[in-house]
Amino acid sequence: MMLKIKNLHVSIDGKEILKGLNLEINPGEVHAIMGPNGAGKSTLASVLAGREEYEISDGTVDFDGKDLLELSTEDRAREGLFLAFQYPIEIPGVSNIQFLRTALNEIREYRGQEQISAKDFMALVREKSKIVELDSKLASRSVNEGFSGGEKKRNEIFQMAMIDPKLAILDETDSGLDIDALRIVANGVNKLKSKENATIVITHYQRLLDYIIPDFVHVLYNGKIVKTGPKELALELEERGYDWIKEELGMEN
Amino acid sequence: MSKLNVGETYEIDINNSNQAFILSAELRSKAAQIIASTDFPTTKTEAWKYTRVTKIKNTKFKILADFPLWRGIKGEESSNQIDKFLIPNLSGSVIVFVNGLFSSELSTIEAENGLEILPLNQDNTFKKDLGKLIPLENEIFYSLNTFYAQDGIAIRIAKNTQLKQTIQLIFISSGENTYIGNRNVIRCEDFSKAHITMNYVSLDNELAFNNTITEISVGSNAHLSVDKIQQESESMNSIISEFVQQEKDSTFSINTFTLGGDLVRNNLNIDVNGQNCETYLSGAYILKSKQHVDNHTIVDHKVAYCESNELYKGVIDDQATAVFNGKVFVRKDAQKINAFQSNGNILLSNTATINSKPELEIYADDVKCSHGSTTGQLDEEAIFYLKSRGISYKTAKKMIVGAFLEDVIKRVSNEHVQLYVNSLTNNSLKV
Ligand SMILES: Nc1ncnc2c1ncn2[C@@H]1O[C@H](COP(=O)(O)OP(=O)(O)OP(=O)(O)O)[C@@H](O)[C@H]1O
Ligand SMILES: [Mg+2]
């Protein structure tokens, strides 16, 4: 098993957001997480990536045999965890290329591998920017600075392609994309898919799941995974909303 | 007069000195009177509002006429010791001063047509005009410099001379309680061009005081650029002043990088006397522990059609304090002036302080002037983003601070100096 989340309780500023969440992911799988606004989807992604302002009051997260919650953010990335941000950050003055090369080299160093040569690195940039059809000009600009919403999301997947993680968490990577950009990003994600890696796709829209076919669809509601089903569940959610699930669970609106 | 008492405890034994003084007897006696009758500035003195000089006031500094420590770093061994102060791959003359005195052993002067370099205490031509434009009234530090200056460098770039190589000046402070007070003069004559670096460094010193003045003139159509790099020891007190006269169609730029020193005050005084001049003042500082660095600039636009551009940026950690006081005067008939001033700061700790005071005094009506200052913290969101890609906190911080200072560092036009400054700023970021 690649990821095993058990009974995860997380709060921020004294407010409990995740209330005993369980999730298991195996290599080769694609999991979609859906759920209403404020359910805790981004919180889950942030906690997995190691954002520090959250308080974890209970639960465990095992990532490929390691206690994920004990690792620093950078070590989680070096162990193969990748988060595509819902709102990618702009970093003026830091070039995309320089930043990615530094990232790759620090990951390699952690793994006891040699530094990547300038030549190999540039070849990799060329190869991977094709996957998401990222304009080579964007690759050399400051990180996300002045990028359009769609370009930022593409840049996230470009970074994912460069880093080649074991587990990628895509937090609403489809939001704000037009249909062409959506297809490009989704194709990119599919091209990166393998038997060894896994993907968590957080989304509100079933249309993304037409391109990235999930093995499981989970409903995150009120801090927990309350329902898990096959890919058809996404269609049903899109048609019927979340109320029926609340009713099914005997919850109040 | 063998001993001079200033305030309660300030005392310099001039009998101990067998060096000739370089300013005229007339100016020196005027300075002596001012020293005897003027108190050190306090925070009630407008120009020193944010900078206390108590430590300078209360320390007995020595003028080392007979330099024991200077001897100590002479000869073969010394050249190795100063190697670390050389800017890698930079060709051209290297002029070294140790505790205010020219070191011929450590210096190499590369002859170029139209270039004249010599220590002021061996000179008779430059001395004549020295100090004419330096205000002494109420100015205890300028007066101290005027009275005690024993040496300094004189550089003349003759008319129509475009220097190909950089002139590298290295000012080393060494020893305990040493008082250093150079008086330098740089004269860029009409249609000349030069690039000069001034590197202020320390070698085993304790509580020294460097009170240096450089008089600069930029002739008409001349171009002078200066990179001032301050990396003295953490017990160093420095008051480093430049007085610049710019004539018509000239360009003057100075980049000040302050990384070391305990108390550092930079006084930049630019008189723009001729039309169609460009003036660029830039600076970056990285401060930690209890460092106090005060950049005080005055650009005086006396005539029309000129442009000045000022950009200072700093990163302040621990209990350090930065002061930026940039004043721009636009005189009555100085129309069509563009003056731009900006100061940006990142505070890395809750106890770090910035006092930023950009000021405009405008007496003309057709001008374009703007000023602004910003203060912020390190962008933790950006740090998290970089870390989430596998980059350590240390590297992430360096990347973000480096990006913040980059536009200042990019103003260094010589690539070797730029690389040097880059590596210094990188190394001085505490992690
Ligand atoms: N710093 C904070 N302080 C207090 N509450 C917070 C803080 N950050 C997030 N929350 C709350 O946590 C809850 C979960 O937010 P989260 O961003 O995880 O939701 P989400 O499922 O990703 O929603 P969306 O679909 O809108 O992206 C929300 O109610 C939100 O307001
Ligand atoms: Mg969200």
Image (spheres, coloured by chain):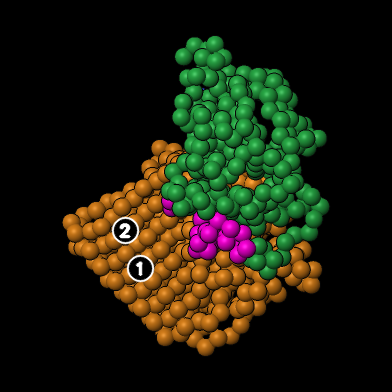
Chain colours: A green, B orange
Q: Is residue B369 left or right of residue B404?
A: left
Which numbered marker is on residue B278?
1
On the image, which quarter does residue B182 sit in?
Answer: bottom right
Q: Earlier in the sequence, mark 1 or mark 2?
A: 1
Q: What's the residue at 69%, 20% (across, down)? A: A7
- Chain under callout 2: B
SS state under label 1: strand
- Chain under callout 1: B
**Is there a contact, CB below 8 Å, between mark 1 and mark 2?**
no
Residue A55, how many percent across, how many down? 63, 23
Q: What's the residue at 55%, 56% (across, down)? A: A132
Q: In the image, what residue type sits under mark 1?
A: Glu
Badge 1: how crowded within 10 Å, few (<14), some, or many (20+)? many
Residue A110, how many percent across, how many down? 77, 48
Q: Which residues are magenta?
A: A125-148
Q: Is residue A21 left or right of residue B152?
A: right
Q: In the image, what residue type sits under mark 2?
A: Ala
Q: Is residue A149 above or below residue B158?
A: above
Whether residue B137 is visible = no
Q: Nearer the viewer, residue B91 or B236?
A: B91
Residue tagged 2: B339
Residue A146 in magenta?
yes
SS state under label 2: strand
